[in-house]
Structures are given as structure tokens and as C-alpha cells.
Image (cartoon, coloured by chain):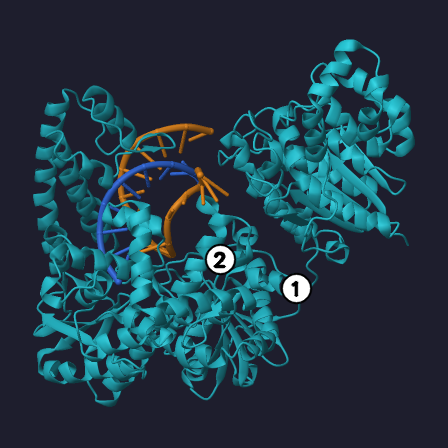
Chain colours: A cyan, B blue, C orange
Amino acid sequence: MSNKLVLIDGNSIIYRAFFALPLLNNDKGVYTNAVYGFTTMLLRILEEQKPTHMLVAFDAGKTTFRHSTYKEYKGGRQKTPPELSEQFPLVKELLDQFNIKHYQLDQYEADDIIGTLSKHGNEKKWDVSVISGDKDLLQLVSDSVTVNVTKKGISDVEAYTPSYMLEKMEIKPEQIIDLKALMGDSSDNIPGVPGVGEKTATKLLKQFHTLEEVYNHVDDVTGKKLKENLINHKDDAFMSKELATINRDSPIEVTLDDLTYTGFQPHDVSVIFKDLGFQSLLERIGEEGSVEESSEELGEIEFKIIDTVTEDIFTGEDALVIEMLSDSYHKSPIEGIGLVNEQESYFIPTEVAINSEVFKTWAEDFSKKKSVFDAKKTLVGFLKHNIHLKGITFDMLLASYLLNPSENNHDIPAIGHRMGKKAILFDEEVYGKGAKIKVPEQPILADHVVRKATLLADLKIEMEEQLNENEQSALLKELEMPLALILGEVEHYGVQVDINRLEAMGTELRSRLDEIEKSIYEIAGETFNLNSPKQLGPILFEKLKLPVIKKTKTGYSTAADVLEQLENEHEIIPKILLYRQLGKLQSTYIEGLLKVVDKKTSKIHTRFNQALTQTGRLSSIDPNLQNIPIRLEEGRKIRQAFVPSKDDWIMFAADYSQIELRVLAHIANDEKLISAFKNDLDIHTQTAMDVFHVQKDEVTGNMRRQAKAVNFGIVYGISDYGLSQNLGITRKEAKQFIERYFESYPGVKQYMDDVVQEAKHKGYVTTLMNRRRYLPDITSRNFNLRSFAERTAMNTPIQGSAADIIKKAMIDLHEKLLDENLQSRILLQVHDELILEAPKEELESLKEIVPAMMENTVELNVPLKVDFAFGSSWFDAK
DNA sequence: CATTTCACGC
DNA sequence: GACGTACGTGAAATGT
């Protein structure tokens, strides 16, 4: 079978499409008209030409080698409208989903890439087809190369072969450059010879064949003025020829073999089509009816519905699934239980299970092994019925998360579909969604729950193998799974809240807010919704004529950093800032917390999401107890409402000092950073000394502040831009800061370079305990995506290793508290700190135990340091 | 019901 | 040379 190579001039087609179609918007407000036009053209080509090899070439940037010949090349062109430039990355993404290669080369244009590859194809006698909107490319036409030029719009193309060219244009392909040399090209700003247009040029070429021959016989040219122009603009003509000549020997890094095209996965493409809002195109790729298709035939499954639990349904390696319809498992009832043992499948109605001594005995038997999906939820679900689940040996949720944290759906049907097991519906399809969610009839419920347990049983081995290959088994079995059980207990135990305290603070805040609001309306001279940026904007920037600093997509920005810059411009600004600050406390913290307090016990039960963040940190929801105010005194008082659950107990808070920078010192093995920590120096002061090359007593407050921001940036992976925003300096200055930091800490610089290289090579980065984060964008040609991936590569091992460490510390501490028979309990984890409550008698023990466990849970080549405090409320534990 | 803007923590 | 920039959760307004 012969090879069919299709080469597309990406820039040209996208430009054509953009101007040919009206500005379309998708539902996210992104312009898609050029992408849409490009896509329709692409689909047509795939259908009609059936390529075996394919490439879309793009122009690389502003300057090309042609500019060294003629700096006015392409001069006078309109700047690419932003509505169009934002579509280029979309097209490239789309091509990735189509499995179609795309390529650009610095200093060269798409034409040159196409010229070079078509030459290669020509040499091998492949059937080559070029697609462009630009007739320049006709110079590539040969017996095996056809150039398709778009006619008006983009829907139709005109195929140029050598014979068609002779017929239509009366010249040969190789004469196109001579034609351009004579007539010029206004769109590329190629001069040509004055007075020579298409007609004259063609006439001359028919007579003399090439530009060189025209000049060799210039005396024979008829027409006095024409001859004179030719002679006077000889240099222009030859330069024009050079400019118009496509470089067919460009130093491209791709070969024909790299361009194999074997088709696309309709599913992959449908995802991006849906994203772009290309509903009409879904049909063309045959993905339209796919939703119904998947729900059509699942096949029958066999299972028994248990009415009395007997021991024989447990064989020692059982998959156990409990079903709940809402996320809040602290309150949500168990709708039913699925059990799959080595031979059979069962559905156990909740009532049957929780009232069965046999079930409880099995569940609490450590030696009876259970695979579950979400150990923490399962544990808490049963705890409410006084069943203390033990013997969990596999958690599918955590396994899936560790295998790829970037997946955002880790429920059983989603994992199943990803791993090729599709005999299950998504929860939404069975239970409905939003307001319409409801428990179905038992047969339907049972079927779905048993399917989940079946998938759990079926996929366990495969997932364990994958974890083994990744050397992540210990991470799952010795870190995340033990932690899940501890977190389950912690959540179930809850945190005591002083409701009266919260309500009193709320009352006081209310009156202050009312007062501030009133005075703002007085200053503004009218009332409006102060919580609406849309209404506040015009008041500030039109009525009061304050200078506009930043705009958002929909209007004026009224964010705090903007208002802070206007603080001295108008008396209204500080009032708005105060209103915002207090309003946040009132709505999120006072009202928000009161809403989720258990009325009977006055306790709050958050949920720690253990399978969400990309770095391995926990997150906390419903409510989020990891962002209770601390920075401003006013907000910090909220912590007065978090109190011990028993009389004569205290709150005990312990936090790692600079854990991320210590982890960095360890991973990067930077001598200077290590010695700073070994000597227990103030790290920000030390950084200031190193970056500014001054002695300790010369470090000013401002220098330390800047050094702190740089350290902060290193830890969080922010860019020079981010740092410049933090410090209110220019990006250039921020960049210099970072460079000076790297000069001071060469080990850190080396690490940053190495880790990015490693990420490029392997496609992922790892933490101390082998947690992974995949970074596919690290090789992206999109600057933003790539830069972001690079910063992530540097940052994730730091943040993720710190997360690993505190997780391990929690396990160690939990075990120690049990071993020592202490009543003290872990209440919360806030990334680098642990909050406990403890009987006063245990305080002295905790002062020893907690820092010791946290500091010694791993051994790094720098010491870990833990500070602690205690008091009668979380506020007082400072 | 989803999106946008803002604000809190690490 | 411009790009548009830590991660999470949640409240409120607003547009559908």
C-alpha cells in the first residue's frame, strides 16, 4: 500500500477560517470560530484523503531567517487580533486529541517545514498532499505533490497538479517564485518590480522562463517603461525571488516516519468537542449517541439478596461496598451493602447487616480481610452503628488516587470505565442528580451496588500490580491506608464548638457591619448592594472618579489588592475593606460554622478529602477547618470558639517550623541551606544575608520581608510575575531576586534544573515516599502550560514530601497515644500542624511526645523542628 | 443551577 | 515578545 502524506499549513488555514466565519463563542466565552473552521476542514481531509502520515505545520514566531535578507518582510501586517491568537493553543490541543502531529521551527515558517517534508515525500515517491490558503505553496507542486488551495471560505479547495497549473496559470510550479519576484506580494510586503502585475509577469515568463533569463535578455523586452523598471529594480526582483523561495532543506527535527497517522479515538476527540461546544461535529465522529450506547446493555449479573447474615458468605477475602447517596457520610444513611467473596455476590440490606451479630463479628475481626472503596467513609459509616470495622487490606479509592492524582473522578464506575470494565452505570444515571436525586427500588439499587463490589473485587489485583510497578505499595499500605483509619476516627470524634461564643461574636459583628454599611452609603450618596462588585465598581470608578487600576472580564476589579492601592485616595476605601473583612467573618465563619454544628453535641465533623490534591496534601470540607482565620487579630478570635470537648481539658497545637524549606534543603542537598537549619538560624534573615550579601545586623526589616517572599515563592512554585505581585516590584526586579537566590544556593539551583529534566524524561515527579505527579505539559510548546508544569515539577516534591512527613507523623503519634494509654486525641491537621485536645494531666507527656513523634518520624539531613502551644481554646494555643 | 468575584488558610 | 501565572473551600451575586 502506498503512503499518503498530508501536510497542512496551520497558520494559513486558521487565519482563513477566522476571517471567513463570524466570531463564535462557546459557553465559556472562548472564541472558537477559527478552531471550528479548521476542524471542519480537518474532518473533510481525513475522510477524503485517508492519510497514512500527517503533519500540521505552524509558524514559529515573529522573526524568520527571511528577515535577515529583508527586515521589512511581512511588514505592515495587521497585528493578530487577540480573538484569533487565543485559538492557536486550542487547535494544537485539538490536534493532540486527534493524534495528529504538529510542528513549528524557530526562524522558519510553516511553508519551509512543508517544503522540506514534501521534498522528502517526493523523493520517496509518496502521494503528498499540501493544504494551504496561500498560493505561494504552488511552487511545491510536482508529479507526486498536489497542493490544495482553499477557495473563498475554507469549505472548498482547488487541487493544483502540474497540468492543472499549466492550464490555469500558464506556468510551471517552479516558476511561481519567478512570478512572485516580478509581481511582488503585498501581503508579505515583497516589493517585486513596479508596474509588473500578474499579466505582465506571466507574459515575461512564457517568453523567458526564469527571472535570470528575463534579465539576460532584458534588451529584448518590449515596452520602454517596463524595461526601465526591470533594470532599475533588478536588486528588488532578485531579493523578492529569494524571499519567495521556500526553503526545502530546513533543519527540521522530524522525519517522515514520525508522522504516521493511525486514526483518532472518537472518545478523546468528543471530550474536546464538548468542551468547545462543537455539538454538530460530534455526530460526524460517531460519538453522538454514545451516552445511550453505554447504558444500553450491561448484561445480567447474578447475586443473592441476604435476609439473614450467615458466616458462609464470608470467605476471608471479601470486597465490601457501602452505598450512600450524599457525600456527607457523617449524616448520610447507608442505603445498602454489596459483598463479593471468592465465589459469589450478595446484596445485604442495611438493616439486615447492622442488626446482625454475625455481620458485626466478621466486620470487627481483624483477621478477616476486606477490600473496600473509601476506607474512611466505610469506617465512619459503620461507626455510627457501633460497628468498628477492622481488617481492611485494600482501598480502591486511595489506590486510584496514588496511581494518578490528576484524575478528578475516583468513584468505582469511573475507575472501571478507565480500566476497561464498563458493565456499570455512573451513579448519576442510577440515582439522578441535583434536586432529583433519589433512592431507587431495591432491585435497581442492589444491582448497582453489587456491580460496584464486583468491580472492586475484579480490579484489586490489577491496581496492586500497578502500584507495585510504581513502587507505591508501601505508600498505600503503610501510609495512606493507616492514615485513612485515623482520619475516620478524627472526623467522627469531631471538634467541640462554643456556640454561645460564636453567636455573641455574630451579634457584635452584625451591628458593626450595619454601621459601616450605613456610613458607606452616606459617603456614596446612594444605597446599593455592597456585596456586589458589579454595583460597587461604578460607584468607585465613575461616581467617585477613583483611578481604575485593574479590570476584570466583566467590569472594574474591586479586589483587596486594588483597593489597598486606593486606600489614601478616598475615605470610603478603608471602610469597604473593613466591611469586606468583617463580612467574610460573619458569612463564612460565624454563620457558616453555626450551620454545620451538630445541634445535639455542639461538635463539628469536617471531612478530610484524602484523594484530591495534586501534591498529597489533605483538604478539608463541610466545613473547611483548614482555613480558620489567624493572620488578623479580628479573625483570629474565631478560634476562641474552638474548645476542648471535656472539662479540664486543653487544646494543644504543634506545628512544623519551615518544613518545606527543610525538605528542600534535604532534597536539594544544598550545603548552605542545610547548615542554616543545622545552626537553627532564622531562615528568612539568613536568606536576606545571602541574597543581599550583608551581615546579620545589616538586614533591614524590608530585606527580610523580601527574602521571606522569595522563600515563599520557592516553596509554592510561584513565578517571577507572582513574586513581583507579592512584593509590589517589577517582574524584572523579581527575576533578579530569584537569580540572586540561586547564586546563593547553588544546590537548590541544581536541584531545580535536575528535577525539571527528570520530569521531562520520565513524565512525572516523585516525593520522598514515592508519591507521583504526572506532568504531561512539561513538553508542551505552549509557553504558559510548559512554565506552569516546570514550576510544578520543582514545587511538588517539596510540598508533597512535607505532606508525606506529616501524614507519617500522624500515624506515629496516634500509635504512641494508644501505646501510652493516653486519652489525648488528634482533632485536626492543617498541612503543617496538628491540633489535639488533652486532659490537663497529660499536658506534660504531650510536650514530650508530640514534638518527638513529629520531629523523628523521618530522618533527613537537616533536623525537623516543631513548635507547640496550648491553652483553653484554639485561640489560646498560640 | 453554573459562573464569576472575592477572601480565608497553607 | 506576549503570554498570565500556587492550591484549596466557600459565600454571595448574577445570569441562565
Q: Residue flagged by tag 2: what amino acid is it?
A: Asn
Residue A470: percent from left, percent from top: 54, 76
- For disc 1, the marked residue is A420
Q: What residue lies at 74% left-to-right and 19% top-to-bottom?
A: A230
Q: What residue lies at 47% left-to-right and 48% top-to-bottom?
A: A784
Subunit of label 1: A
Location of residue A238 (image quadrant): top right
In this view, the residue in front, A230 or A595, is A230
Separation of marks 1 and 2 at Cα, in angstroms? 18 Å
Say left or right for A294 vs A566. right
Say left or right for A822 vs A461. left
Q: Looking at the picture, does residue A500 appear above or below residue A94?
A: below
Subunit of label 2: A
Say left or right for A590 vs A758. left
Q: Looking at the picture, does residue A657 appear above or below residue A863?
A: above
* Residue A621 visible at all: no
Q: Badge 1, how many Cα within 10 Å: few under 14, some, many 20+?
A: few
Residue A408: percent from left, percent from top: 49, 57
Residue A235: percent from left, percent from top: 68, 27
Q: Residue flagged by tag 1: what amino acid is it?
A: Gly
Q: Badge 2, how many Cα within 10 Å: few under 14, some, many 20+?
A: few
Residue A147: percent from left, percent from top: 80, 36
In this view, the residue in front, A534 or A164, is A164
Q: Do marks 1 and 2 both belong to one polypeptide chain? A: yes
* Residue A52 visible at all: yes
Q: Looking at the picture, does residue A701 appear above or below residue A9?
A: below
Q: Looking at the picture, does residue A513 appear above or below residue A358?
A: above
Q: What residue lies at 10% left-to-right and 50% top-to-bottom?
A: A634
Position of the C terminus of chain A by quadrant: bottom left
- For disc 2, the marked residue is A408
Closer to the chain start, of discs 1 and 2, is: 2
